[in-house]
Amino acid sequence: MPHDHHDHPHSLLPSDPALRVKALETILVRKGLVDPAAIEAILETYEKKVGPHLGAAVVARAWADPDFHALLLRDANAAMAEMGITGRQGEHVVAVANTPQTHNMVVCTLCSCYPWPLLGIPPAWYKSDAYRARSVREPRKVLADFGVTLPEGQAVRVWDSTAEVRYLVVPIRPDGTEGWSTERLQPLVTRDSMIGTGLPRSPA
Amino acid sequence: MSRPHDMGGRFGDGPVVPTADGFSPYDAGWHRTALGLTLAAGGLGAWTIDASRAARERLPDYGSLGYYEKWIAALADLLAERDLVSRDELRAGDAEPAPLSPRALTADRVPGVLARGTPYARPGDTPVFAPGDQVRTRALPQNAFVAEGHIRLPAYAAGKTGRVILSHGPHVFPDRNAHGLGEGPEPLYTVAFRAADLWAEPEHPGDEVTLDLWESYLSAA
């Protein structure tokens, strides 16, 4: 079996992370390997356009529209495409709906895979060692860190994203929202409720 | 073999610290640059996502680096391995000016590149297993082609029995793709395991953990 031999040239860069990233940026821009305008265009995308409001729009529409709900669970990418939502780290999406019997929760224990086109840049806790290590073994204790307590009879299914499939949790629609429009439902859908570490907001 | 990135089920970590709803802020200004620089450099097309994950995993100081620190260290290693950046340039933190490479991702192409993404489904073999089938994962989470190579079977799910719940068709196989051995697509499945079959002290008898696993990780059980 061949052995992968690697050394670690990154140690030649400054060790301070701010100086390290600055040095690498300087090298790549000066060499013409990275266009500074492309960096800004990427960041602008995830700072202004792509974020959890997109996932919330999908979930709210699924709550309001049974046909869309069925499509979302059958073929999430087709449902997303109807709303113009596509992109890197969301090429193969599976939507999983919470029920009174099962609560779904998403993690990536091996790195930090996350459905970027639906939820944007992952929050710091999602990328933390504590979340990656604990979610699969003690999901209820992790939920307690978020102030969430599940009903006693509800099981937890934790989805460890080990491939390029990305998972979107469709939370249970809150009581007291019968007849609400998609627009009125959307603010109830939090980012964490679509990862499974939170529940949607209750109607005021 | 040290696999510090394979931390699922590990003991000893503290609480998870939630953050406010909405767009996730950067915790430091340089995180912003690290994100933009890494994605822009990825636009060179000089490595795959599997190669970049493998580069992060083999960082000798993986356990002590933050998320974006891993990104930047692995980015520097990938650039040097592919002779895009020299050791002298890394040491100097500078380089001779050159015109923009035709390989570089330009700003006008960014929206299209981000919106298209990179699909990983491929034509390939008909899946051997079907939803409902009982399967057992290989006993050791070890790459079959490269010693200490990249693999997407976490240690906590090695040598365990579960049942197939989703069949995704052939997907690029990271164990090959991360090491330049081709995409070698294999059928990919989502397999559900009872928490009681994974952990000594499961929280609830009905709990499950699912993983996305390639066919060669699995045998009929």
Image (cartoon, rainbow, N blue to C red):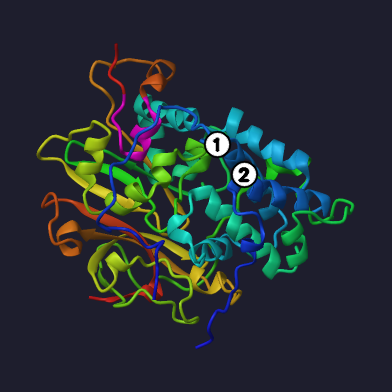
The residue pinned by badge 2 equals A18
Percent of width and height locating residue B124: 51, 71
Which residue ends up furthest to the bottom in the rendered image? A1
Chain that bears disc 2: A
* Left or right relative to A187: residue B132: left
- Tag 1: amino acid: Ala
Magenta includes B121?
Answer: no
Taking the spot 63% from the left edge, 47% from the top edge, the residue there is B116
How many discs appear? 2
Q: Picture quarter containing residue B190?
A: bottom left
| Vertical relation: B92 (above or below) A70 | below
Image position, residue A4 (x, y; %): 55, 79
Q: Nearer the viewer, residue A68 or A170?
A: A170
Q: Which mark is residue B28?
A: 1
Q: Looking at numbered disc 2 in the image, what kind of residue is underneath it?
A: Ala
> Residue drawn at (45%, 27%), measured in percent from left and top?
B22
Q: Quadrant of residue A151?
A: top left
- Pinpoint residue A116: horizontal percent, then vertical percent: 51, 42
Question: Which structural element holds mark 2?
Answer: helix
Residue located 60% across and 35% down the image: B29
Tell me the magenta residue range. A189-200
What is the quadrant of residue A201 in the picture?
top left
User: Is there CB contact under 8 Å for labels 2 and 1?
Assistant: yes
Q: Is residue A105 shown left or right of residue B48?
A: left
**Where the C terminus of chain A falls, by quadrant?**
top left
Q: CA distance from mark 2 to mark 1?
A: 9 Å
